[in-house]
Amino acid sequence: MPDWDLLLTDARVATLQDGAADYGVFEGAIGIRDGVIEWLGEHAEGSAGDTRSLDGRWVTPALIDCHTHIVFAGNRAAEFEQRLRGASYEEIARAGGGIMSTVRATREASEDELLRLALPRLMALMREGVATIEIKSGYGLDIDNEIKMLRVARRLGESTPIEVRTTLLAAHALPPEFKNDADRYIDHICAEILPRVLSEGLADAVDAYCEDIAFSGPQVARLFRESESLGIPVKLHADQLTDGGGAELAAHFSALSADHLEYTSTVGVAAMAEANTTAVLLPAAFLTLGETQLPPVDALREQNVPVAIASDCNPGTAPMCSLRSNMMLASRLFRLTPEECMAGVTRNAARALGLPDRGSIETGKRADLAIWDISHPRELAYWSGTPQLSELLTAGHTVNLRA
Ligand code: NIG
Ligand code: FE
């Protein structure tokens, strides 16, 4: 029996290992067995079922998009125009548009229709080197439609080689059935939606939108207590439009991540550091909303909070189905270095999803690898919209990028 199923030789490898300087670069070979990286070294060793020279091409961990809303129907281009004319995201939401307009379109769509709409979005991310993606519900806001969305997300994972992690975001907006009674809707999520979703194995985490136009801190805390008692990890849309103490709240519940964070205070950052909660920055939403308040990047660095970057792809605040573009925006808008951007879409994105088995090139990690036609990994946060992915491997198998 050969030592490796697949041996990649003559590779330039950016391991993105935690603590390694300069992208963790080395030149050499990668031995893969049973879908896992089993061996790394400068000179190829052992026998292999399949040996392939990469002729000096670069290999990085496959990318991970740890925050998306790619299952939805309709679009909000008319609201985009309204916002360009001066209306704010909050005003549109309070007038019954915003998230609710996508909820109406998504409720009307069948499961098959939602799958048909979401598949090209997933393929677009995959062609940029994404092998793991998180997809949230949150445009159903009732038991049947939240389940419908999550089933579509699971089917996306089953019908592609990409791993899909699903998140229940029933606490995204207040549905019309519970008008003026957010407390009663939170009760309904805790008593009905959450247990049913978990019993059907449809969610890997629970998320909520903590904001003036969505749910208050105490309401989110109630949902998170219930999630905690059921043993499901939490994450939070925190401090996107105002400092609502979202980062502190997420930290209090040892959330996997707190996301957005434009208005997070240094106290919030310290709480996240203490709780080991990953910060997920979403530059496309910052750009699309015309936001000027920058997330506290220096404080996150000083407190050693791991920073991930995600696309947040959604029809309202982030109509941009590209993780590579978000890397470029994170460097340009938030002044993250290209290396921080790479860590943000690999090992730190893996942390934001609670997936210690991936996100860097190390022995024992999944062989989810991206092979690139570039001259240095810093190019990955520099170009966007440029087809530089030469090959994507998930668990050691080449993905068909044309399918
Ligand atoms: O991540 N902030 C709330 N949720 C989404 C926006 C969803 C929408 O506007 O449809 C976000 O930005
Ligand atoms: Fe989001």
Image: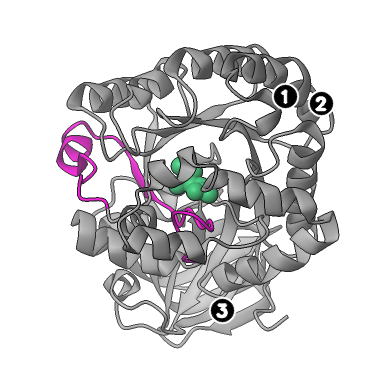
Q: Is residue 5 left or right of residue 306?
A: right
Q: Magenta span covers which residues?
A: 291-320
Circle nearer the viewer, 2 or 3: 2
Residue 219 % position (x, y): 52, 15
Q: Earlier in the sequence, mark 2 or mark 3?
A: 2
Q: Quadrant of the N terminus?
A: bottom right
Q: Are dots 1 and 2 in contact, CB under 8 Å? A: yes
10 Å neighbourhood of mark 1: few (<14), some, or many (≥20)? Answer: many
Q: Main secondary structure of the magenta part?
A: loop
Q: Residue furthest bottom?
A: 55
Q: Position of residue 237 (x, y in %)?
A: 45, 35
Q: Is residue 318 magenta?
A: yes
Q: Which amino acid type is marked by label 2?
A: Arg
Write the residue at 21% across / 27% down: 265
Residue lying at 76% horizontally and 67% vertically, measured from the top left = 116
State which mark lies toward you, 3 or 1: 1
Residue 137, percent from left and from top:
65, 43
Q: Which residue is mark 3?
A: 391
Query: Is 247 in front, or is 217?
Result: 217
Assess whether mark 3 and mark 2 are in contact (beta carbons under 8 angstroms).
no
Q: Mark 3 or mark 1: name the one nearer the start of the chain.
A: 1
Q: Quadrant of residue 121?
A: bottom right
Disc 1 residue type (three-letter): Leu
Q: Residue at x 84, y 61 (%)?
A: 112
Query: What amino acid type should be assigned to the residue bearing mark 3?
Result: Glu
**SS at mark 3 in the image:** strand
Callout 2: 10 Å neighbours few (<14), some, many (20+)? some
Residue assigned mark 2: 196
